[in-house]
Image (cartoon, grey):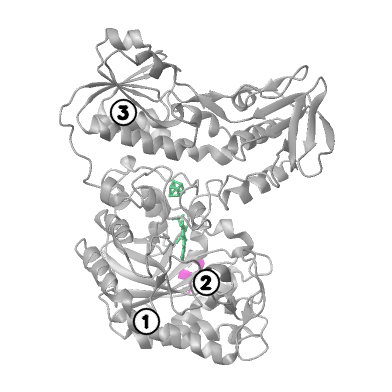
């Protein structure tokens, strides 16, 4: 892969001094404790600074008691935060990384159960992701809030951080003032574009006043609201012009989205790469202030293109650096070794809306940097021959971790290819990137020289004959057999359905969804693509209950547009000669759906025969992933890594 050159070049413009063109943009980690940066969050950001990033934007911090979106928020209006910001800034500076802090108020984008305050917003307009109507601020409250921006900037200025960023994107409060959808005021804060931008410009002025003239003040803007009745790219070009005209701002970071399509704020894997770069480029054309682009910039070459095209002066890379904290260093030296973000949103954005700390599907160290981060992996005390059985994500992770530590590893896989169930799970274009993790693991095994034996069933006898004293069992899981009576209509497992090539035009399929996850929706999509009329029947109130809040929306939209029908709150009772007998779980009314085939997504059961076979043979056996209990890639990678570290 070509090594990027622009990406590593410094960006020096006035107060803005970055050692390279990369930024870790603001994102809530849900790791704060008591409103300050605790150890866990500190280690999390430090890890990315060690990985070479030019600046870390410390997640949205509250500028006023009405601002926090959830309890684990940083409370920057409170002096108590200063020592923890100092410690963080010092840590980042050791690695030449700047510390910027994002000043935020979520306005109507939350719930007062979490904030313990009535929501403050320009008007009493509900945000699409909030359960409640906000309080329309009085003029006095607007002034109080602007004072809050200034006072908070002054608090942050007492620390050694290098900059602050006014969050005016994603329908946060200043963006709510900008938007005619959220802002229905008729006073000087609403109505005309001049009135609607007043709050943002005033907030910038107050922040500069509070923060002083020496250090960086940036602004995060949408480049588009991505909704028909919202502000467009042209509107935001004008907003950016006005922001620049204040003469107070050192950079403009350009993103997109509002609560109307909340899933697009952190665009999942079925959205194209570099998705918001054109919006940044439109702004860059009219301002001389440095512009930062964001949005699925995950590869070094892609980032380099943003810079080479002149679309932006720097790139903000969030999830790719969550997935691999060494993203910058690796991108600048050996891009092919980057552990890829697969855009699944499972562990990051998914956790945000359930108030759980950030994690990552492909990187178990996220939020656990002290125990699992860079430099914590120790060479094996006694290097030995290790057999890993199973070439899915758990087995491969175990194998490459053990090999890195100095063990001589042989990986056995009964199929003719690596990847396990992930290969099937990535069978449609929209889920293709899921395969990124197993492709990375396979390439890493090659780089580490691990011997891989495909098409080899590793029995206890074979392992014994070859003298393996240590075996990692990662043999995965298989679909459960049907638990309901079935006769006549063919019943397929999700894998069989995906493998059922050919023309399904005119045929009816009922997918029985007992999992609330892709083992049901993947075959539904595949068969719809092949021409089938597909119905997804779920006992829950809606399909996708176990998907994160962004992926579930994209899944519903995609499948609905492909003609897939969703049948909620029905349980399958029996597969009959002509289709499926169902029972409404709310009314107990029975109904029948005709079908030419039924796909039963009923979950998996463990494939753990080898563990039993090895018992009593004096072999050290460690099990990982689905063969312990069938779950997701997250657990497979985590347990595989743990197994590899434990040997
Ligand atoms: C868990 C999570 C929380 C986020 N919270 C914020 C936030 O508080 N403020 C913000 O400006 N952007 C937030 N974002 C958006 C990111 O800054 C970034 O714009 C987005 O993830 C797209 O960039 P990427 O494709 O590089 O991940 C968040 C993203 C994630 C994944
Ligand atoms: S959880 Fe998924 S989307 Fe989020 S950073 Fe990890 S791989 Fe990327």
Q: Position of residue 491 (x, y in %)?
A: 70, 21
Q: Residue at x 30, y 68 (%)?
A: 99
| Secondary structure state at the residue bearing disc 1 | helix
Q: Residue furthest left?
A: 381
Q: Position of residue 367 (x, y in %)?
A: 35, 52
In the image, the segment drawn in magenta is 282-286
Labels 1 and 2: the sequence-earlier one: 2
Height in image: 562 above or below 101?
above
Quickly name the residue at label 3: 399
Quickly name the residue at label 2: 115
Quadrant in which the C terminus appears: top left
Quickly name the residue at label 1: 153
Q: Position of residue 327 (x, y in %)?
A: 32, 50
Labels 2 and 3: the sequence-earlier one: 2
Quadrant in the rendering for residue 238: bottom right
Labels 3 and 1: the sequence-earlier one: 1
Height in image: 195 above or below 102?
below
Q: Residue at x 23, y 33 (%)?
A: 404
Tell which of 82 and 52 is nearer to you.
82
| Secondary structure state at the residue bearing disc 3 | helix
Q: Are marks 1 and 2 in contact (CB under 8 Å)?
A: no
On whether residue 55 falls in the magenta region, the answer is no
The response on whether ligand 1 sits within 8 Å of label 2 is no
| Secondary structure state at the residue bearing disc 2 | helix
């Amino acid at each position: 892969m070509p090594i990027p050159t622009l990406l590593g070049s410094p960006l020096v413009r006035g107060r803005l001094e970055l050692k390279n063109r990369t930024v870790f943009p603001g994102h809530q980690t849900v790791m704060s404790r008591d409103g300050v940066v605790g150890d866990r969050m500190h280690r999390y950001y430090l890890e990315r600074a060690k990985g070479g990033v030019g600046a870390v934007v410390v997640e949205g911090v509250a500028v006023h008691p009405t601002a926090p979106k959830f309890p684990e928020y940083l409370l920057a209006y409170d002096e108590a935060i200063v020592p923890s910001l100092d410690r963080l800034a010092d840590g980042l500076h050791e690695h030449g990384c700047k510390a910027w802090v994002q000043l935020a108020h979520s306005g109507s984008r939350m719930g007062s159960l979490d904030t313990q305050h009535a929501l403050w917003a320009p008007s009493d307009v509900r945000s699409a992701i909030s359960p409640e109507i906000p309080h329309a601020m009085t003029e006095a409250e607007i002034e109080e809030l602007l004072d809050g921006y200034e006072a908070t900037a002054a608090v942050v200025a007492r620390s050694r951080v290098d900059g602050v960023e006014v969050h005016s994107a994603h329908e946060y409060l200043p963006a709510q003032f900008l938007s005619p959808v959220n802002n229905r005021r008729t006073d000087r804060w609403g109505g005309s574009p001049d009135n609607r931008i007043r709050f943002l410009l005033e907030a910038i002025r107050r922040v500069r006043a509070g923060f002083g003239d020496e250090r960086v003040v940036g602004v995060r803007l949408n480049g588009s609201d991505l909704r028909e009745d919202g502000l467009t790219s042209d509107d935001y070009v004008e907003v950016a012009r006005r922001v620049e005209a204040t003469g107070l701002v050192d950079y403009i970071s350009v993103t997109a989205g509002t609560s109307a399509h909340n899933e697009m704020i952190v665009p999942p894997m079925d959205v194209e790469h570099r998705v918001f770069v054109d919006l940044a480029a439109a702004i860059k054309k009219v301002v001389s202030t440095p512009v930062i682009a964001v949005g699925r910039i995950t590869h070094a070459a892609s980032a380099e293109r943003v810079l080479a095209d002149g679309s932006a002066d720097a790139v903000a890379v969030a999830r790719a650096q969550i997935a691999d904290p060494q993203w910058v260093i690796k991108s600048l030296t050996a891009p092919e070794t980057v552990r890829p973000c697969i855009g699944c949103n499972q562990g990051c954005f998914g956790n945000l809306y359930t108030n759980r700390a950030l994690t990552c599907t492909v990187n178990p160290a996220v939020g656990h940097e002290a125990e699992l981060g860079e430099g914590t992996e120790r060479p094996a005390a006694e290097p030995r021959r290790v057999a890993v059985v199973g070439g899915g994500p758990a087995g491969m992770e175990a194998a490459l971790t053990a090999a890195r530590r100095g063990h001589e590893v042989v990986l056995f896989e009964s199929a003719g290819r690596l990847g396990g169930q992930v290969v099937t799970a990535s069978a449609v274009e929209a889920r293709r990137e899921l395969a990124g993790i197993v492709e990375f693991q396979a390439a890493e095994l090659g780089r580490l020289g691990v011997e891989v034996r495909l098409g080899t069933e590793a029995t206890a006898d074979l392992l014994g004959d070859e003298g393996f004293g240590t075996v990692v069992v990662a043999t995965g899981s298989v679909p459960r057999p049907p638990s309901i009576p079935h006769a006549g209509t063919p019943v397929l497992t999700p894998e069989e359905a995906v493998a059922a090539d050919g023309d399904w035009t005119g045929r009816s399929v009922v997918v029985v969804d007992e999992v609330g996850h892709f083992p049901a929706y993947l075959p539904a999509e595949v068969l719809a693509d092949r021409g089938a009329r597909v119905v997804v029947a779920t006992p829950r109130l809606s399909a996708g209950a176990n998907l994160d809040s962004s992926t579930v929306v994209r899944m519903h939209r995609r499948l609905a547009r492909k003609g897939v029908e969703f049948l909620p709150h029905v349980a399958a009772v029996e597969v009959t000669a002509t289709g499926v007998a169902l029972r409404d779980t709310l009314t107990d009314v029975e109904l029948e759906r005709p079908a030419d085939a039924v796909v039963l997504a009923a979950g998996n059961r463990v494939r753990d025969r080898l563990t039993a076979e090895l018992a009593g043979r004096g072999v050290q056996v460690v099990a990982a992933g689905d063969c312990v209990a069938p779950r997701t890639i997250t657990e497979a990678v985590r347990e595989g890594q743990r197994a590899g570290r434990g040997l």
